[in-house]
Amino acid sequence: MRLLHARLRHVALWLPSRERIEQALQGNLCRCTGYEPIVKAAERASELRPTAIFDPIERMRANVIERLATIGEGPTIHISHEGDDLYVPASLGDLAEILGRHPHATVVAGSTDVGLWVTKQMRPINPVIFIGGVAALQSIGVEDDEVLIGAGVTYSQALTVLAQSHPALGKLIPRIGGEQVRNMGTIGGNIANGSPIGDMPPALIALCARLTLRSQEGVRELPLEEFFIDYGKQDRQRHEFVESVCVPKLPDDAQFAVYKIAKRRDEDITAVLGAFYLRLDAGGRVAEVRLAYGGMAGIPKRAASVEAALLGKAWTEANVRAAAAELGKDFTPLTDWRASAEYRLMAAKNLLTRFYLETQGEDAELVRFAAGAGR
């Protein structure tokens, strides 16, 4: 009987939560809205399957991981076929040297976006430089006051660290793509791609993150917000590549939140994203404020007029609503199939009001869904 109870406890601990099942389903779209039966089927299958110890799939996965771990670092790889070239550099120096010789090459990490250039747009991307072999780009460094993320670090790899240092990012990242995309897509690639609806750049801009670029000529560092110049244009020379992004940790007196608006909660492209950083002085006045938006312009950028209207003012609902009216000076959003210009502007104002309400503790539901639901 004791053995039976022990086995039951082991199974209960191993069974996935509903949240974990929903995350696993993010990459599978059900067009007949049959998600609830699918979740129940997954729960039932989890109860009936062998425990993780005896599951052949788990054994195979462990074996593959063990074999991959034995593969050591090797020299730079160059494969050429019928005029197409692939380079897999083994070090930062090799990457800089190859990009210096081929400044028009396509640098690829997870290929979650570049892959679509090929399959949907039929764009040539030759030569290709794959950075997966550069160990220095896969590292995460945690210091007392900052987190340093290599350009090759995936969302999944960064999630645990960023969730600890910035809880709002821990709620945002699981809504970026599906789990398969987060396992491949990199934060550095999301930045280098320069999309105006990329989810991470507005949040990192609000946190005053710094970007490091590298080339054969050396290393250059700049504030992340200065990297984005115009739609499709970034402050990066052809021979430069993104090496890392440095994210300052939150001071004890700072408040930070991120909200993503999309048609679906999971695995959907953003219509509007707002990131809000705030520090108040002892008198309750705004001492420091950074408000960054995505989906509102050709680049992710800060709401400078709104920030100016808030700085030094008392943090009150009346002042927040008055400042939100200045958003029209900072942004002229476009209308597309994701949202109209009017909706985007209204949503951006409402997200600022939502942030204010949460800082006052006035709505527990809003706090619970910080950086959460797209509604």
Image (cartoon, rainbow, N blue to C red):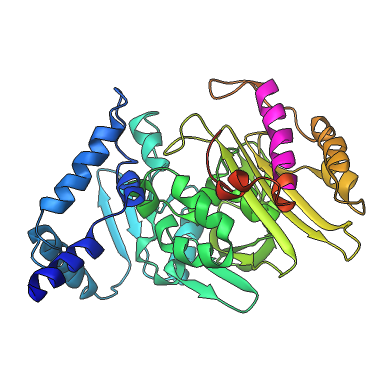
Q: In this rendering, would 110 be left or right of 67?
A: right
Which is nearer the eye, 358 or 301? 358
Residue at the image position 29 percent from the left and 29 percent from the top = 30
Q: In this rendering, would 357 be left or right of 38?
A: right
The quadrant of the image that shows the N terminus is bottom left
Q: In this rendering, would 80 be left or right of 361?
A: left
Q: Is residue 288 above or below residue 348?
A: below
The outermost residue toward the front is: 1
Q: Main secondary structure of the magenta part?
A: helix
Does the magenta portion include 150? Answer: no
Which is nearer the eye, 46 or 322? 46
- Give coordinates of residue 312: x percent, y percent: 92, 54
- Give coordinates of residue 246: x percent, y percent: 61, 66
Residue at the image position 25 percent from the left and 64 percent from the top = 13
Query: Is any part of residue 292 visible from this angle?
Result: yes
The outermost residue toward the bottom is: 144
Residue at the image position 69 percent from the left and 53 percent from the top = 206
Range covered by the magenta-colored residues: 342-356
Residue 339 picture quarter? top right
Q: Is residue 307 above or below residue 272?
A: below
Which is nearer the eye, 132 or 202? 202
Does the magenta portion include 344? Answer: yes
Q: Is residue 120 above or below residue 54?
A: above
- Give coordinates of residue 213: x percent, y percent: 59, 62
Residue 239 picture quarter? bottom right
Residue 296 picture quarter? top right
- Give coordinates of residue 103: x percent, y percent: 51, 52
Q: In this rendering, would 63 be left or right of 82?
A: left
The quadrant of the image that shows the C terminus is top right
Query: Is any part of residue 97 visible from this angle?
Result: no
